[in-house]
Image (cartoon, rainbow, N blue to C red):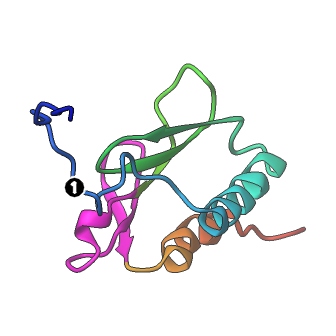
């Protein structure tokens, strides 16, 4: 009979190893990003997946700070909402429980008058 030593860093079975956007969330985010690229508002994006949050950043140019950051923090699901839209200077533009109303802020800025 073999004995296994106890794990000094136990991880709960219910907690995921990292937070990520699911397929439908990425589809909605990439739709908005594609419209921004078509209007030459954005040229690059970056994704970051950590243990407690996931970030999708939209850049005008690669070497700059992001124009927008879309964050998903499941720990805030029951409080302010797990989705947040953060502007270039770090200001909170919108926070919500659903992704579509959060992305609507960017979509409104893409609407322009046609001559």
For disc 1, the neighbor class at 10 Å (few under 14, some 14 to 19, many from 20) is: few
Q: Tell me what residue is drawn at x 23 percent, y 80 percent.
A: 78
Q: Quadrant of the C terminus?
A: bottom right
Q: Tell me what residue is drawn at x 24 percent, y 64 percent.
A: 75
Please state the extent of the stretch shown in magenta in the rendering.
72-96
The picture places residue 36, in percent across and down from the top left corner, at 72, 52
106 versus 59 height, above or below: below
33 versus 74 height, above or below: above
Most extreme residue toward the top, as rendered? 63
Q: Tell me what residue is drawn at x 36 percent, y 41 percent.
A: 50
Find numbered disc 1 in the image and state the secondary structure of the residue it sits on. loop
Q: Quadrant of the N terminus?
A: top left
Q: Nearer the viewer, residue 57 or 49?
A: 49
**Residue 110, quarter of picture:** bottom right
The picture places residue 73, in percent across and down from the top left corner, at 32, 60
Q: Nearer the viewer, residue 17 or 88?
A: 17
Q: Nearer the viewer, residue 28 or 88?
A: 28
Most extreme residue toward the right, as rendered? 115
Residue carrying label 1: 12
The picture places residue 67, in percent across and down from the top left corner, at 51, 43
Q: Tell me what residue is drawn at x 74 percent, y 62 percent.
A: 31
**Residue 94, quarter of picture:** bottom left
* The stretch drawn in magenta includes residue 84: yes
Left or right, residue 113 beside residue 95: right
The picture places residue 84, in percent across and down from the top left corner, at 38, 63
* The stretch drawn in magenta includes residue 78: yes
**Residue 106, quarter of picture:** bottom right
20 versus 77 height, above or below: above
How many discs mark residues in the rendered view?
1
Left or right, residue 84 beside residue 65: left
């Amino acid at each position: 009979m073999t004995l296994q030593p106890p794990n000094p860093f136990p991880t709960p079975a219910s907690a995921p190893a990292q937070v990520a956007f699911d397929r439908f969330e990425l589809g909605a985010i990439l739709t908005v990003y594609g419209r921004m690229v078509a209007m030459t508002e954005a040229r690059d994006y970056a994704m970051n997946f950590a243990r407690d949050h996931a970030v999708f950043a939209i850049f005008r140019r690669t070497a700059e700070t992001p124009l927008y950051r879309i964050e998903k923090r499941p720990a805030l699901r029951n409080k302010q909402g797990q989705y947040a839209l953060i502007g270039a200077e770090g200001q909170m533009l919108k926070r919500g429980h659903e992704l579509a109303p959060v992305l609507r802020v960017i979509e409104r800025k893409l609407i322009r008058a046609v001559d």
